[in-house]
Image (spheres, rainbow, N blue to C red):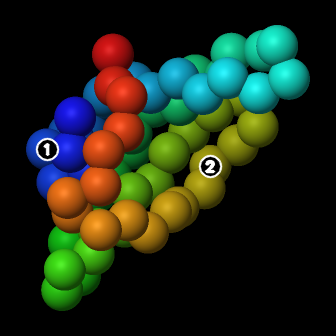
Amino acid sequence: MKIQELKQGDKITQHLDNATILFEVLSIKQIGRRFLVTFRSAYGIATASYQGDSFITAI
């Protein structure tokens, strides 16, 4: 899924050191060509910046 297609509530998984971490999209905001995506996981809340045509695996 392209970053620009993400919606609030979408879930994303990431595999790190034989563990799967679930991230939930809390918000997404377009700033120019980039998108700021705020995620929540078991580790807390964080925001990342992506190009809109970047791909991410969402469930």
* SS at circle 1: helix
Asked whether 12 or 54 is in front, the reply is 54
Front residue of 9/12: it is 12
Q: Amino acid at mark 2?
A: Ile
Query: Residue at image x 27%, y 75%?
Result: 34
Examine the image and state in which quarter residue 33 appears: bottom left
Across and down, in percent, residue 8 comes to: 26, 39
Q: How far across and down, in percent of the image, does residue 5 sit? A: 13, 44
Asked whether residue 29 is in view, the answer is no
- In percent of width and height, residue 30 lies at 20, 72
Residue appearing at x 22%, y 34% in the figure: 1
Residue 8, above or below 53: above
Q: Which residue is mark 1?
A: 5
Cβ atoms under marks 1 and 2 closer than 8 Å:
no
Q: Is residue 55 left or right of residue 46?
A: left
Q: The residue tagged with tag 2: helix, strand or loop?
A: strand
Q: Which mark is residue 19?
A: none
Q: Residues within 10 Å of mark 1 (few under 14, many from 20)?
A: few
Q: Quadrant of residue 25?
A: top left
Tell me the quarter of the picture where residue 46 sits: bottom right
Residue of label 2: 45
Mark whose residue sits in front, 1 or 2: 1
Report whether 48 appears left or right of 44. Answer: left
- 58 over 26 or under it: above or below: above
Q: Residue furthest left?
A: 5
Q: Is residue 9 visible?
A: yes
Residue drawn 20% across the image and 45% down it: 2
Identify the amino acid type marked 1.
Glu
Q: Position of residue 59 (x, y in %)?
A: 33, 16
Near mark 2 (Cα within 10 A), the count class, few <14, some 14-19 or many ≥20, is few
